[in-house]
Image: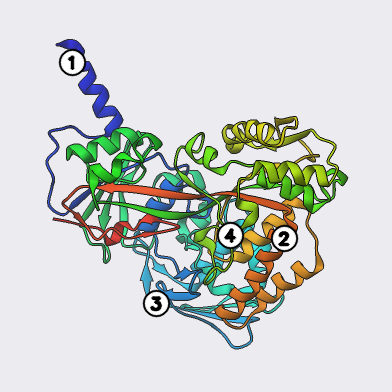
């Protein structure tokens, strides 16, 4: 009996709920992992984006595929010359009762640009504004160092939401992340409790009055939804991947994440300067084995260079370097007289799947391939796990070129023209040219793109997902 009681206590600690939990009207219970941080400009993980997406309202929502901008906290984001931009704000208030003004954004963006946070490159590498000012309480003006049509996409990044004057003055970022104050449809009641979670209370247009966020193990949360003691699980572990279709019918969703994996080649190294060699390695990658193995069904094998979450317009043609063809890969290495032997370098987040990758390359290409933690300048391919801060293809294409040392002038010009394009359609065509050139020259080989999963109970309705937030908590209702 005492042993059974112990098991019950352990189950409560893991799932954050018990089988006796009643469903409360107007309260949505949600299972999440522990967010790495709730400081929005430094969020790069799915759990953090889910929570901050409920606490803040971004300037706009931007769809990379259509180029469509939907203003939210902004009334408009406009320019006549793509150098001088004007952002008009809707009236807004922080959860502490202070007004959200143009100066709130200007001061927040200055803090982000001066930081080492995840979203800092949006200002230092992508936006490159010479001046950002508050013309009046509801008007932000930006002057860029060149014409760019990507400003709406960049300013819609979820990490560029405003912070209240209190934390901008104190600079107590760690303290603020424990009790964040946003401008969104929900406020965090009582702060965040690591290992446990937090409670969101509606202050705006949320569909439910309250959201209970429960931190726990995804497998246990999946079972809790199935048992009726949790409304929504925001992650489905690999071992439940196939079962969720039968367990939940149409009460599950899969969405594209702003995340992708690549193999970047040091193109300035003579051993990898020949594109034939790089294509040989790309054809030797068994992407399905990575997806089913160390990546645990949390990704899709790559079918393009740009992941679906970052894709402008319709895609045409197929991605030959995304195929697994061991015989063709070996033939290409032989054709290029590749001397054999390679080390693939990895960072902390890439180690598990890189070790599986090198075993597969060794078997497929019949050459010695080893894995090693990255230190200094790599003399072989590098595994990349790229997390995106914006929906603009410019961010990813420019980063991939930089990671490999690829400096082709035609590619650089197409990327610059896409950045400066007057319309989303024109930009999409130019991004396609840049993407296709990378697939031909292959300084980086696409491996996989991330996706998220969620399952929910029958009383839950209107589950909508986006690449950056996953399930949009403010849209979800309960009966």
Question: Residue 389 location, x and y as percent?
Answer: 55, 57
Residue under numbered circle 4 = 306
Question: Residue 2 location, x and y as percent?
Answer: 17, 11
Earlier residue among tags 3 and 2: 3
Find out whether the residues at labels 3 and 1 contact each other: C-beta distance under 8 Å: no
Find out whether the residues at labels 1 and 4 contact each other: C-beta distance under 8 Å: no
451 versus 70 height, above or below: above
Earlier residue among tags 4 and 2: 4
Rendered image: mark on residue 90? 3
SS for tag 1?
helix
Closest to the observer, 442 or 253: 442
SS for tag 3?
loop
Residue under numbered circle 1 = 4
Q: Which of marks 4 and 2 is in front?
A: 2
Q: Which of marks 3 and 2 is in front?
A: 2
> CA separation, marks 4 and 2?
14 Å
SS for tag 4?
loop
Residue under numbered circle 2 = 440
Q: Which of marks 3 and 1 is in front?
A: 1
Question: Residue 150 location, x and y as percent?
Answer: 59, 73
Task: Answer whether residue 445 is visible to the viewer in this image.
Answer: yes
> CA separation, marks 4 and 3?
34 Å
> CA separation, marks 3 and 1?
56 Å
460 versus 229 height, above or below: below
- Looking at this view, name the residue that lies furthest to the bottom: 80
Is 458 on the left or on the right of 111, as rendered?
left
Task: Answer whether residue 124 is visible to the viewer in this image.
Answer: no
Earlier residue among tags 3 and 1: 1
């Amino acid at each position: 009996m005492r042993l059974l009681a112990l098991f019950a206590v352990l189950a409560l600690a893991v799932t954050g709920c018990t089988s006796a939990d009643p469903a409360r009207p107007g309260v949505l219970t949600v299972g999440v992992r522990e967010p790495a941080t709730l400081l929005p400009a430094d969020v790069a993980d799915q759990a953090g984006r889910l929570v901050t997406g409920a606490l803040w309202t971004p300037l706009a929502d931007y769809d990379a595929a259509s180029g469509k901008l939907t203003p939210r906290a902004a009334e408009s984001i406009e320019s006549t010359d793509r150098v001088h931009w004007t952002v008009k704000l809707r009236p807004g208030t922080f959860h502490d009762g202070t007004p959200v003004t143009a100066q709130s954004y200007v001061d927040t963006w200055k803090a982000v640009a001066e930081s080492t946070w995840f979203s800092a490159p949006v200002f230092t590498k992508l936006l490159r504004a010479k001046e950002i000012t508050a013309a009046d309480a509801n008007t932000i003006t930006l002057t860029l160092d060149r014409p760019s049509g990507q400003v709406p996409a960049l300013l819609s990044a979820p990490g560029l939401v405003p912070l209240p004057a209190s934390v901008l003055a104190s600079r107590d970022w760690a303290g603020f992340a424990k009790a964040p104050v946003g401008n969104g449809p929900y406020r965090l009641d009582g702060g965040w409790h690591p290992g446990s979670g937090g409670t969101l209370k509606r202050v705006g247009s949320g569909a439910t009055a309250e959201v209970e966020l429960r931190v726990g193990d995804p497998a246990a949360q999946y079972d809790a939804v199935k048992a009726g003691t949790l409304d929504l699980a925001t992650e489905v572990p690999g071992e439940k991947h196939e079962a969720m279709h039968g367990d939940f019918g149409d009460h599950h969703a899969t969405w594209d994440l702003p995340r992708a994996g690549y193999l970047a080649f040091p193109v300035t190294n003579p051993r990898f300067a020949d594109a034939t060699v790089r294509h040989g390695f790309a054809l030797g990658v068994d992407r399905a084995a990575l997806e089913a193995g160390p990546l645990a069904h949390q990704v899709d094998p790559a079918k393009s260079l740009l992941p679906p979450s970052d894709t402008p317009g319709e895609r045409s043609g197929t991605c030959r370097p995304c195929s697994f063809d061991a015989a063709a890969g070996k033939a290409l290495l032989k054709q290029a007289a590749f001397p054999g032997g390679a080390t693939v370098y990895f960072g902390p987040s890439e180690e598990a799947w890189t070790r599986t990758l090198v075993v597969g390359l060794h078997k497929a290409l019949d050459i010695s391939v080893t894995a090693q933690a990255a230190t200094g300048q790599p003399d072989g391919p590098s595994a990349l796990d790229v997390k995106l801060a914006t929906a603009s293809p410019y961010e990813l294409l420019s980063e991939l070129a930089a990671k490999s040392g690829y400096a082709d002038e035609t590619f650089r010009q197409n990327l610059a023209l896409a950045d400066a394009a007057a319309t989303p359609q024109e930009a999409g065509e130019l991004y396609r040219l840049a993407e296709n050139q990378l697939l031909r020259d292959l300084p980086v080989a696409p491996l996989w793109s991330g996706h998220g999963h969620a399952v929910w109970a029958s009383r839950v309705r209107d589950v909508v997902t986006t690449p950056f937030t996953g399930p949009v908590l403010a849209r979800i209702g309960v009966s």
